[in-house]
Amino acid sequence: MSLIGSQKKLSMGDKGFFYTCELYGNDHTVREKEIRDIIAFFNRKNTQLLFIEIDDGQEWGDLDPNNLDDLSISEEEIINTLNASKGLYQ
């Protein structure tokens, strides 16, 4: 995503999605590093992230922005999940 595209998404607040991935796909180890890097970057900026988990086959456009809390998971849950699966996927 371009810098301008990222700025536009971030300016949308909790309605702006700027990173999506399938966490346990074939490229899990790459995604894991990206996720950890994103979390570390925003922690250094003291900026809270909103993590949304959707089911396979579900489309982002199908989500109701007013109910994102029902789909959100905490940063701690993300880190715990990454830590628990470390080394299991190559």
Image (cartoon, rainbow, N blue to C red):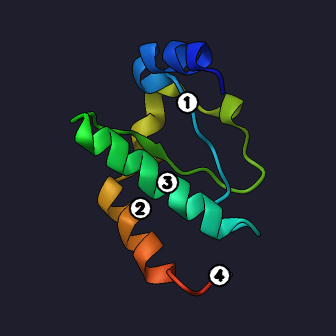
Residue 22, image x and y in percent?
68, 57
Q: Identify the secondary structure beneath mark 4.
A: loop
Mark 1–mark 2 Cα distance, whole angstroms, equals: 17 Å
**Disc 3 element:** helix
The residue under label 4 is which amino acid type?
Tyr
Q: Is residue 87 above or below residue 18?
A: below
* Residue designated by label 2: 78
What is the spatial separation of the Cα atoms under label 4 and label 1, in whole angstroms?
26 Å
Residue type (three-letter) at the residue carrying disc 2: Ile
Residue at position x 46%, y 36% in the image? 68
Give whichever of discs 1 and 3 has the lower sequence position.
1
The N terminus appears in which quarter of the rendering?
top right
Q: Which residue is mark 3?
A: 35
Q: What is the distance, in whole Å, between disc 2 and disc 4 at their CAs?
A: 16 Å
Q: Quadrant of the C terminus?
A: bottom right
**Dot 1 corresponds to which residue?**
17
Q: Nearer the viewer, mark 2 or mark 3?
A: 3
- Residue 89 numbered mark, or none: 4
Q: Amino acid at mark 1?
A: Phe
Asked if 50 appears above or below 26 in the picture, the reply is: above
Residue neighbourhood size for the residue with mark 1, other residues' Cα within 10 Å, grouped as few (<14), some (14–19), many (≥20): some
| Residue 13 located left or right of residue 7 | left
User: Residue visible at 38% across and 49% down?
Assistant: 39
Residue at 55% from the left image edge and 86% from the top image edge: 87
Badge 4 density bin: few <14, some 14–19, many ≥20, Cα 10 Å: few
Mark 2 neighbour class, 10 Å CA radius: few under 14, some 14 to 19, many 20 or more: some
